[in-house]
Image (tube, rainbow, N blue to C red):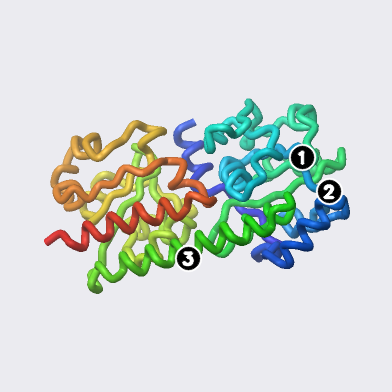
Amino acid sequence: MRPVRALGASLVIGAVALASACGGSGDSGKDKAKASGGAPVVVQAANGSVTIPATPQHIVSLSPTHTETLFAIGAGKQVTAADELSNYPADAPRTKLSGFKPNAEAIIAAKPDLVVLSNDMDGIVDALAKVKIPVLLEPAATKLDEVYDEIQDLGKATGHSTEAAKLTEQMRTGIQQTVASASKATGGRKLSYYHELDNELHSVTSKTFIGQVYGLFGLENIADGADKASGGYPQLSQEYLLRRDPNMIFLADTKCCGQSPVAVGKRPGWSDLSAVKKQNTVALDDDIASRWGPRLPEFVKSIAAAVQKASAAK
């Protein structure tokens, strides 16, 4: 059973600005047949063994990442309500429901036959269990294998195991190919980076999920030396960042905080940074950079492009 984990970067951004599962792909044909025929399907999630009585047709998703996944595996039409932050894809049935401050009465009023979420806020899992609504707690991933596992869990729960297995294989292969291609470009050169969560210089360390994605490229994270009691999300000082002078800067605050390569270049002292002078400051999509779902390969490609450009710089 997968342990319950915090939402990581998403919670940090919210605060500032406002054992792995066993799902597996299994026999996808049997999973789909069981759900379609009305026989129970059992999924191992962070909240234990969850029985899905039949293929759910009224899914409530309280996680933007899981909303993306449900649509990517072909279960989009089964999603009848999504939380207020589920802004992708555009046709997701976005509502005022919240995954951060879940309202049990509002969720129950949506008449779901399955609720999917990434964090058990305010005891929502138990509250829904009392009225016998199946709930899948699939927390924020801490490593890539958990990303693939959660996608397959959702596939099994919704009768889309085959599609989920295909998606995870595409993601796995795409990421491996992207990393391999970029790694060849470095020629063994050790590059450093800074990942910005907000314009108050909160960042991530190598032990976070985001940091591990960067770690695939063998990059040095300048925030590692600043992490003391911040659980992987330290706030850097201006002096510290300027002193460490990263080769690359990744801005994951373009939406939340209106940041851009031009904007950060105007910060005091930043024009002297190597990343700014050599135009190795990358504007990321906040959502893609903070979610662990189907668009993760896009985040990896953004890193790869920056690595290749920085490696080519003299």
Q: Earlier in the sequence, mark 3 or mark 1?
A: 1
Distance from the alpha carbon under mark 3 to that under mark 2: 32 Å
- State left or right for residue 225 relative to residue 132: left
Distance from the alpha carbon under mark 1 to that under mark 2: 9 Å
Judging depth in this view, the residue of 139 and 155 nearest the camera is 155
**Label 3: how many Cα within 10 Å (few below 14, some 14–19, many 20+):** few
For the C terminus, which image quadrant?
bottom left
Residue 54 tag number: 2
Judging depth in this view, the residue of 114 and 264 nearest the camera is 114
User: SS of the residue at dot 3?
Assistant: helix
Q: Is residue 139 above or below residue 270?
A: below
Report the residue at 42% width, 58% height from top.
Answer: 211
Report the residue at 51% width, 43% height from top.
Answer: 10
Q: Is residue 183 above or below residue 108?
A: below
Report the residue at 26% width, 44% height from top.
Answer: 238
Q: Mark 3: which amino acid?
A: Thr
**Label 2: how many Cα within 10 Å (few below 14, some 14–19, many 20+):** many
Q: Residue furthest bottom?
A: 188
Q: Mark 1: which amino acid?
A: Gln
Q: Which residue is mark 1?
A: 57
Q: Are marks 3 and 1 in contact (CB under 8 Å)?
A: no
Residue 173 tag number: 3
